[in-house]
Amino acid sequence: MRKRILPRLSVFCLIFAVNSSLIAAEFDHDSVIVKRCQDFKITGDGLTDQWKNAEWINLLQPDPDNSAYNTKVKVLYSKSGIYFLFHCGDKKLTSTMKADNLNLWEEDVAEVFLWTDENFPVYFEYELSPFNFELPIMVPNNNGNFLGWLPWHYEGERRTQHATSISRENGKDISAWEAEFFIPYKLLAPLSNVPPQSGTKWRANMYRIDYDKGSEVPFAWQKTATTFHEYKKFGTFIFQ
């Protein structure tokens, strides 16, 4: 049987279509490009010039029409760690815990999950409350059985940097709160793919929890079904 030979133009179109689909899959809504930056000081208000180079990532919320609670995040990375800036629209702060390493998720909180190696079901979880109390834990997840471990020798270059601020209308009514933090790579040891290089991919998710309605209202970058710890549903950070 004689082989069918595609005309050159058809071959070119086919190659272009395949490449375009691959590019679309690589940079779809489940992925975000994390830009590189120089290290900078955490202030809690997101006014540092470095943040101008990062795009806002909107988190999904239960009531998209209620713009008062819009939540968005920026992400950057440097040679020494990864930076996050949360802007959380709000009307009331539910935040009574006044110490680190408590069950911060039971009140208003911003959260980040970093799963650096898909071959190893261990990831880093970081939580920060509106009043700047933190919970940094490493989480081994064995098919849904998980529990966090607090860091050892949590000091010096292994310690996070974090700060928060509260925005008010007319100097009185709360309109939003900001959470800004830096996670050093040395804290993530010995996870693989750390520090990231240009082209490195980490699985990740970002959340915010609000309790204005008296019960937990979750906001998420990538939606999960029953728990924030469904790591196979995380999105992807692609480091520039």
Image: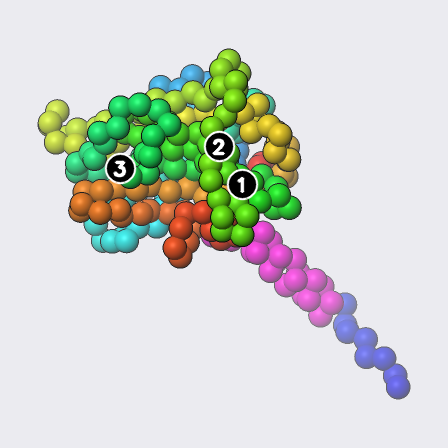
Colour mode of the rendering = rainbow
Q: Pick whichever of labels 1 and 3 is earlier in the sequence.
A: 3
User: Element at badge 2?
Assistant: loop
User: Element at badge 1?
Assistant: strand
Mark 2 or 3: in front is 2
What are the residue bounds of the magenta stretch? 9-30
Residue located 26% across and 28% down the image: 97
Label 2 belongs to which residue? 149
Residue located 74% across and 67% down the image: 11
Q: Are marks 1 and 2 in contact (CB under 8 Å)?
A: yes
The image position of residue 180, as x and y in percent, is 37, 27
Q: Pick whichever of labels 2 and 3 is earlier in the sequence.
A: 3
The image position of residue 116, as x and y in percent, is 58, 39
Between the residue at mark 1 and the residue at mark 2, the CA separation in whole angstroms equals: 8 Å
Label 3 belongs to which residue? 107
Between the residue at mark 1 and the residue at mark 3, the CA separation in whole angstroms equals: 24 Å
Q: Amino acid at mark 3?
A: Glu
Label 1 belongs to which residue? 140
Q: Amino acid at mark 2?
A: Trp
In reply to whether residue 162 is colored magenta, the answer given is no
Residue 141 horizontal side relative to residue 161, left or right: right
